[in-house]
C-alpha cells in the first residue's frame, strides 16, 4: 500500500496540468522581444555617435601635436632629465660657419682635425694631439667657404688636449665657449666635425679621464660619434658651444664613447695659452699615488683612501715626515671614500692655494697638515724642430 501510494503520488504529480493563467509562452512575451530589439538599435546608434566624436577629438589632438613638433615645441616627458632647450637650425648653422678644417703636415706625416674660430681676428681652438709625430709642421686652415689660410701655432697643452693657433684675417665669423650652461645626464648635444659634419648624442656623465699617469682632467663622457678628422671640433647644446671634442675610446668591448673638455676649462686654458703659451695655474699635490677602494680595504684589512707611493721633491709634503705607504683619508674635511672626492677638490683650486689633508700614518696615527698646491707641468705635442 505504501509503495503504491508513493507511486500514485509521483504519477499524479507529473501529470498535473498548469492552470491557464500560469503562462510561460504567450503573446505579451513576443512584445518584450520587440522592445529589446529597439533598445539594441538605440544602443548601437549611440555607440556610433560616440565613436564619431572620438575620431574627431583624436584628429584634433594629432593636429596639435604636429604643430608643436613643427614649431620645435617638444611634448614634455617627466622621465627625461634635461637642463637645456632644443637647439634651432639657425643657431647650429651659425656655429658651423665658425668651424674650420685643419691640416697639419710635413714631408712624412699628415694629420687632419677640426677647430673653431673664437675671435674675429683669427684665433682658433683645436686639440693638441694633432701635432703628434708631425715635427716642424705646416698648418693650413680651411673655412666653410673653401678659403685657405696658413696658421701660426700659439700654444698648447697635452694634458688638457687643447691648443690655440692663429690665422691672419679680419672680420671672421666666430663663436665663444659658454661656461654658464649646467649640463646634466641625458642632455642632448651636437658635435660638429670636419667640413661642418654634425653628429648627435647625449651627456653620459662627468669623469676624470686618465691622461698618461695623471687623472687631473675632468671630462664629459658622451655617446657622440667622433670620426677621423673631427678632433678639436665644437660641441653644442642650447645653441651655445659647451665643450671641445677631444677623444674617443676604441676597444672591442666599448661602443660609442667619446670625451669632451668642458667650456669652463677651455676658456681658462685659452686665456693662458694666448698670454703665456702654456697652462700656468693647474694644481697638483706633487705625489704619485694609488687609490685604495673601500672594498679593497676590507678584502686586504687596510685603510681606504689615497695611498702615497712617491713624494716629489718639489711637493709641499716633502720633508714633513711623511713616507710612502701613508694614506690620505680626508681633504678639506671630506672623507675620501671615492677617488673623485680628491680630484674634484683639486680641480676647483689653482696652483698656490692650500688644502687641508688628514693623513693616516703607517703606525696608525692620524695627522692633519696644510699643503700648498704646486703647478702641474704643461707640455705640448707641438715641436718646431
Image: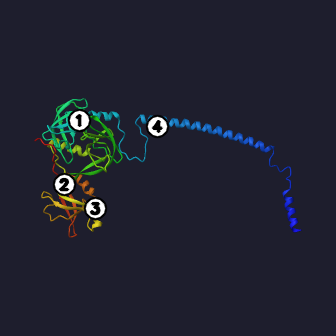
Rounded to the nearest angstrom, the CA distance separating label 1 from label 3 is 44 Å
Q: Which of labels 2 and 1 is toward the front?
A: 1
Q: Residue at x 49, y 36 (%)?
A: 62
Q: Which of labels 2 and 3 is toward the front?
A: 3
Rounded to the nearest angstrom, the CA distance separating label 1 from label 4 is 39 Å
- Taking the image as drawn, is residue 348 in sight? no
The residue tagged 2 is 284
Rounded to the nearest angstrom, the CA distance separating label 3 from label 4 is 50 Å
Q: Nearer the viewer, residue 126 or 104?
A: 104
Q: Quadrant of the N terminus?
A: bottom right
| Disc on the earlier residue, 3 or 4 | 4
In percent of width and height, residue 189 lies at 33, 42
Q: Which mark is residue 11?
A: none
Q: Are marks 3 and 4 in contact (CB under 8 Å)?
A: no
Rounded to the nearest angstrom, the CA distance separating label 2 from label 4 is 54 Å
| Disc on the earlier residue, 2 or 3 | 2
Q: Are marks 2 and 4 in contact (CB under 8 Å)?
A: no
Q: Residue at x 29, y 60 (%)?
A: 337
Q: Secondary structure at mark 3?
A: loop
Rounded to the nearest angstrom, the CA distance separating label 2 from label 3 is 21 Å
Q: Which mark is residue 293?
A: 3
Question: Dividing the picture into quarters, in which one does residue 98 lie?
Answer: top left
Quick check: 58 left or right of 250? right
Q: Secondary structure at mark 2?
A: strand
In percent of width and height, residue 308 lies at 20, 62
Quick check: 155 left or right of 230? left
Q: Nearer the viewer, residue 189 or 373?
A: 189
The residue tagged 4 is 65
Amino acid at each position: 500500500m505504501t509503495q503504491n501510494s508513493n507511486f500514485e503520488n509521483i504519477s499524479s504529480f507529473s501529470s498535473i496540468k498548469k492552470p491557464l493563467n500560469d503562462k510561460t509562452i504567450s503573446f505579451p512575451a513576443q512584445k518584450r522581444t520587440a522592445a529589446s530589439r529597439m533598445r539594441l538599435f538605440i544602443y548601437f546608434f549611440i555607440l556610433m555617435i560616440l565613436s564619431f566624436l572620438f575620431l574627431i577629438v583624436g584628429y584634433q589632438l594629432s593636429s596639435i601635436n604636429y604643430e608643436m613638433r613643427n614649431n620645435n615645441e617638444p611634448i614634455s616627458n617627466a622621465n627625461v632629465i634635461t637642463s637645456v632647450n632644443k637647439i634651432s637650425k639657425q643657431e647650429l648653422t651659425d656655429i658651423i660657419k665658425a668651424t674650420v678644417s685643419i691640416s697639419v703636415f710635413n714631408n712624412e706625416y699628415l694629420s687632419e682635425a677640426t677647430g673653431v674660430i673664437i675671435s674675429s681676428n683669427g684665433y682658433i681652438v683645436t686639440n693638441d694631439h694633432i701635432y703628434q709625430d708631425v715635427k716642424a709642421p705646416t698648418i693650413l686652415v680651411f673655412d666653410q667657404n673653401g678659403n685657405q689660410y696658413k696658421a701660426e701655432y700659439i700654444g698648447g697643452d697635452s694634458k688638457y688636449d687643447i691648443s690655440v693657433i692663429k690665422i691672419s684675417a679680419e672680420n671672421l665669423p666666430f663663436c665663444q665657449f659658454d661656461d654658464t650652461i649646467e649640463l646634466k645626464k641625458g642632455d642632448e648635444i651636437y658635435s660638429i666635425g670636419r667640413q661642418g659634419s654634425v653628429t648627435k648624442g647625449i651627456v653620459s656623465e662627468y669623469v676624470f679621464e686618465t691622461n698618461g699617469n695623471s687623472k687631473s682632467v675632468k671630462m664629459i663622457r658622451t655617446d657622440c660619434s667622433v670620426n677621423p678628422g673631427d678632433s678639436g671640433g665644437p660641441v653644442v647644446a642650447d645653441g651655445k658651444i659647451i665643450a671641445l671634442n677631444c677623444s674617443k675610446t676604441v676597444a672591442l668591448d666599448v661602443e660609442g664613447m667619446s670625451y669632451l673638455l668642458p667650456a669652463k676649462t677651455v676658456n681658462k686654458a685659452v686665456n693662458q695659452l694666448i698670454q703665456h703659451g702654456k697652462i700656468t695655474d693647474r694644481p697638483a699635490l706633487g705625489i704619485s699615488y694609488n687609490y685604495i677602494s673601500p672594498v679593497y680595504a676590507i678584502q686586504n684589512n687596510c685603510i681606504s683612501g689615497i695611498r702615497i707611493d712617491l713624494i716629489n721633491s718639489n711637493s709641499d709634503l716633502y720633508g714633513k715626515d711623511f713616507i710612502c705607504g701613508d694614506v690620505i683619508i680626508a681633504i678639506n674635511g671630506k672623507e675620501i671614500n671615492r677617488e673623485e672626492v680628491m680630484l674634484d677638490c683639486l680641480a676647483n683650486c689653482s696652483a698656490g692655494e692650500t688644502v687641508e689633508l688628514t693623513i693616516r700614518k703607517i703606525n696608525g696615527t692620524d695627522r692633519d697638515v696644510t699643503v700648498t698646491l704646486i703647478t702641474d707641468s704643461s707640455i705640448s705635442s707641438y715641436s718646431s724642430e
